[in-house]
């Protein structure tokens, strides 16, 4: 059976997350249902990462083994005709039969959006964390610098994170925008812990509000204590933008979000 790779874009507002759960509709469940309609048999799919309830994606990568030999265009057009309006297939292609979207991932890019307008924004309520008081952008930019590189990110992992270890490498980050409008945090890394980006953003906002000094994130990083960090930022501001691949599986298969 051919193995097919899909790149998905979705608005996570109406879902309990990527993974199938008993408490509501999931993105995975909707995609599998559409595949079953297209291929006329149940098909299991697996993804590069499990986005949480309310989190979005523009570059989620999934794979499945197809019981039929179809042109890539058939998966792209066929699934888009069956999926709800808030989920879409961006690309489809046949790949190496050993391809695993999680184990072969060399890195990921996330974007977190803040709306810093003085009044609420109906257009941003499902895609931004709305903070109405002015933020200190320069202090926020300074605060994230210690995160670049390979570190133990225990101070920014969820309490129920099941990862085997907390060592992750952030290869690129940028915090930019305009106070009074939109501020965006873009981060790339080899992999991420559960809630890692949202926990970082919660701490960054503490700095932006003047409740903590710019050294705060470095202190949390060194202390490796989640209870010392800021709140977990709301899910709607977070988007999985891209997953990066090489030619095979990565060396550390447990290094996953």
Image: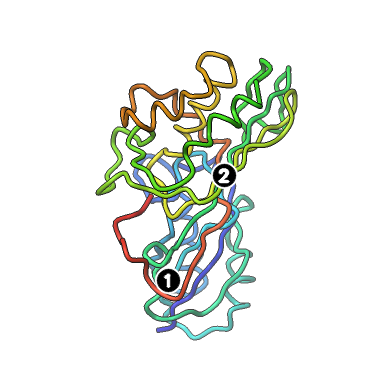
User: Is 192 positioned to the left or the right of 37 in the image?
Assistant: left
The residue tagged 1 is: 64
Dots 2, 1 in contact, CB < 8 A: no
Where disc 2 sits, the SS reads: strand
Quarter holding residue 224: top left
Q: With respect to residue 257, does 53 lie above or below?
A: above
Return the residue nearer the eye: 23 or 198.
198
Q: Position of residue 255 (x, y in %)?
A: 33, 54
User: Is 220 positioned to the left or the right of 147 in the image?
Assistant: left
Q: With respect to residue 11, does 90 lie above or below?
A: below
Q: Position of residue 232 (x, y in %)?
A: 45, 28
Return the residue nearer the eye: 189 or 215.
215
Q: Residues within 10 Å of mark 2 (few under 14, many from 20)?
A: some
Q: Position of residue 248 (x, y in %)?
A: 40, 74
Of marks 2 and 1, the one in the foreground = 2
- Residue at (33% x, 41% y) in the render: 152
Q: Quadrant of the N terminus?
A: bottom left
Query: What colour scheme has been applied to the protein in the rendered image?
Result: rainbow
- Residue at (60% x, 24% y) in the render: 139
Quarter holding residue 97: bottom left
Q: With respect to residue 58, does 113 lie above or below?
A: above
- Residue at (47% x, 33% y) in the render: 200
The residue tagged 2 is: 173
Marks 2 and 1 sit apart, C-alpha to C-alpha, by 32 Å
Where disc 1 sits, the SS reads: strand
- Residue at (50% x, 55% y) in the render: 108
């Amino acid at each position: 059976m051919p193995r097919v790779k899909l790149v998905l874009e979705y608005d996570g507002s109406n879902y309990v997350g990527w993974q199938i759960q008993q408490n509501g509709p999931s993105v995975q469940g909707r995609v599998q249902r559409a595949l079953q309609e297209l291929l006329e048999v149940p098909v299991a799919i697996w993804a590069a990462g499990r986005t949480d309830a309310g989190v979005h994606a523009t570059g989620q990568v999934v794979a499945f083994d197809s019981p039929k030999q179809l042109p890539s265009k058939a998966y792209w057009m066929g699934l888009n005709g069956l999926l709800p309006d808030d989920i879409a297939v961006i690309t489809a292609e046949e790949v190496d039969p050993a391809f695993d979207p999680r184990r072969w991932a060399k890195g990921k890019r996330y974007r977190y959006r803040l709306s810093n307008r003085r009044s609420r924004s109906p257009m941003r309520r499902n895609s931004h964390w709305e903070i109405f008081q002015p933020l200190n952008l320069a202090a926020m930019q300074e605060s994230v610098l210690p995160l670049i590189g390979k570190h133990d990110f225990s101070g920014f992992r969820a309490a129920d994170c099941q990862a085997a270890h907390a060592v992750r490498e952030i290869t690129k980050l940028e915090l930019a925008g305009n106070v009074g409008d939109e501020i965006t945090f873009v981060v790339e890394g080899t992999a991420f812990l559960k809630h890692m980006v949202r926990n970082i953003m919660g701490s960054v906002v503490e700095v932006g509000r003047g409740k903590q000094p710019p050294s705060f994130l470095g202190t949390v990083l060194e202390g490796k204590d989640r209870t010392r960090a800021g709140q977990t930022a709301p899910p709607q501001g977070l988007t999985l933008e891209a997953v990066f691949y090489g030619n095979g599986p990565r060396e550390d298969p447990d290094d996953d979000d």
